[in-house]
Amino acid sequence: MFAGKRLSKVFHSISPLDKEWYKLTLNAHLQELLKMKEHLPPGISIIKDDNLEEWQMDIKVLDDNPLYKDQTYRLKFTFGSKYPIEPPEVQFIELPSTSDTPRPIPMHPHIYSNGIICLDLLSSAGWSPVQTVESVCMSIQSMLTANNRNERPPGDAEFVSYNKRRPRDIAFMYDDDNV
């Protein structure tokens, strides 16, 4: 109910042309969710989808990569009003080992310990409106599957300590495509 009221306030505060655009993107977003609920690829689960501004997904790596064997990870998707034209913010979130469903942040040279993912696909330059939540989850599964380095990105501790920007506002340098 709260999300519906917030969306209603946003809707009433925008211009008529923007309202039409908002209706179209909202409908596309809803259609994407309904399609995903009918069929998801193996290793991907919808955990939270009670509003169209934020979803949570669980992903598993399906091969025998020892770094990720028997692990499940939680992704948070935050959608702006211009999704799917602009990418969602996607970040791993941690659920403590004391919870009913513990979810660690995976070790990977492109994943910071606060869950921020350095992946070209998630940047404005690398994003395409044909991408979906499902294709992003599959890309992240693939990124984890291909990795064999049990390490964080260089400068992880400093980045996590000092970065106060949202993932979409970070200008990553994509110079390592070996993992």
Image (cartoon, rainbow, N blue to C red):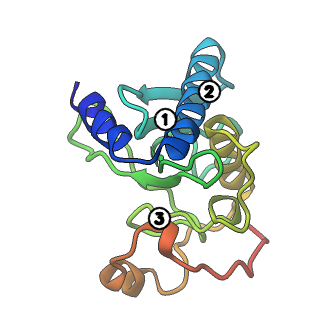
The local crowd at label 3, few if under 14, some if 14 to 19, many if 20 or more residues have their Cα within 10 Å, is: many
When the figure is inspected, residue 70 is found, relative to residue 158, above or below; the finding is above
Question: Residue 50 lies in what quarter of the image?
Answer: top left
- The answer to whether marks 1 and 2 mark residues whose Cβ atoms lie closer than 8 Å is no
Q: Which residue is mark 2?
A: 32
Drawn side of residue 103 relative to residue 137, left or right: left
Amino acid marked by disc 2: Glu
Tell me which residue sits at (73%, 63%) in the image: 126
Drawn side of residue 1 relative to residue 168, left or right: left
When the figure is inspected, residue 175 is found, relative to residue 8, above or below; the finding is below
When the figure is inspected, residue 40 is found, relative to residue 159, above or below; the finding is above
Tell me which residue sits at (45%, 53%) in the image: 92
Measure the C-alpha gap from mark 3 to mark 1. Answer: 16 Å
Q: Which residue is mark 1?
A: 58
Viewer-side residue, 9 vs 28: 9
Mark closer to the observer (1, 2): 2
Residue 172 image point, x, y percent: 60, 79
Measure the C-alpha gap from mark 1 to mark 2. Answer: 17 Å
Quadrant location of the C terminus in the rendered image: bottom right
Q: Secondary structure at mark 2?
A: helix
Residue 29 image point, x, y percent: 57, 32
Amino acid marked by disc 3: Ile
Q: Secondary structure at mark 1?
A: strand
Going from N to C along the chain, the mark reached first, 1 or 2, is: 2
- The answer to whether marks 3 and 2 mark residues whose Cβ atoms lie closer than 8 Å is no
Amino acid marked by disc 1: Asp
Going from N to C along the chain, the mark reached first, 3 or 2, is: 2
Viewer-side residue, 10 vs 176: 10
Residue 33 got which mark?
A: none
Tell me which residue sits at (69%, 66%) in the image: 120
Measure the C-alpha gap from mark 3 to mark 2. Answer: 24 Å
